[in-house]
Amino acid sequence: MDQRLPRLGALVFFTSRLDACAEFYRLIGIPLVEEQHDQDGVVHFACELEGVHIAFFNAVDEGNAPPLSTAGCCFPGLAVTSVREIVHRVEAAGATILQPASEYPWGLRAVLSDPDGRPFEVFEPTAATQI
């Protein structure tokens, strides 16, 4: 790997449904905790996941994320141990499944919708495509 290439360091999300988003992503397995960096800092949820800082902050206004495959849409994905288990957990919590678990050349995959309508992929890599 070329050490001069950039690497992903952070994913920061803004939401008008901060608690609901934190709970949704915890169900997927992202260990978000409440943070406030100093006395006047903004309360938010964050964690480090495989060297990437993930954070959720309150948005300055109400609204939804752009739908899947539309301009402005961000489509994060997470390699997981069990797609079916995660789909079951988020479905039981009332989340929308945009694309049910299906086999692809790289493994089993499903696309979920978080409380903001943001599409989020979970996938189980096959042995040949382990990351």
Image (cartoon, helix red, strand yellow):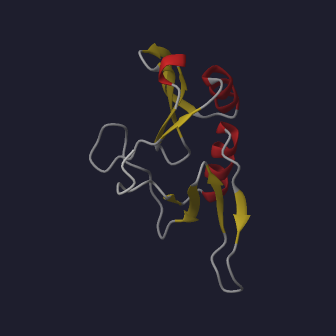
Residue 3: quarter of image: bottom left
The furthest residue to the bottom: 40
Q: Nearer the viewer, residue 66 or 38?
A: 38
Q: Position of residue 21 (x, y in %)?
A: 61, 50
Q: Nearer the viewer, residue 115 or 104?
A: 104
Task: Name the residue: 66% across, 61% down.
Answer: 45
Residue 58: quarter of image: bottom right
The furthest residue to the left: 71
Q: Position of residue 90 (x, y in %)?
A: 65, 32
Task: Name the residue: 69% across, 44% down.
Answer: 26
Q: Nearer the viewer, residue 50 or 123?
A: 50
Q: Quadrant of the N terminus?
A: top left
Quick check: 6 above or below 77?
A: below
The furthest residue to the front: 2
Quick check: 109 above or below 58?
A: above
Q: Is residue 30 left or right of residue 106?
A: right
Q: Position of residue 28 (x, y in %)?
A: 65, 37
Q: Is residue 3 left or right of residue 107?
A: left
Task: Name the residue: 63% across, 20% down.
Answer: 84
Q: Exactly how many numbered labels are in the figure?
A: 0
Q: Position of residue 87 (x, y in %)?
A: 62, 26
Q: Nearer the viewer, residue 7 or 20?
A: 7
Task: Name the residue: 69% across, 74% down.
Answer: 36
Quick check: 103 above or below 85?
A: above
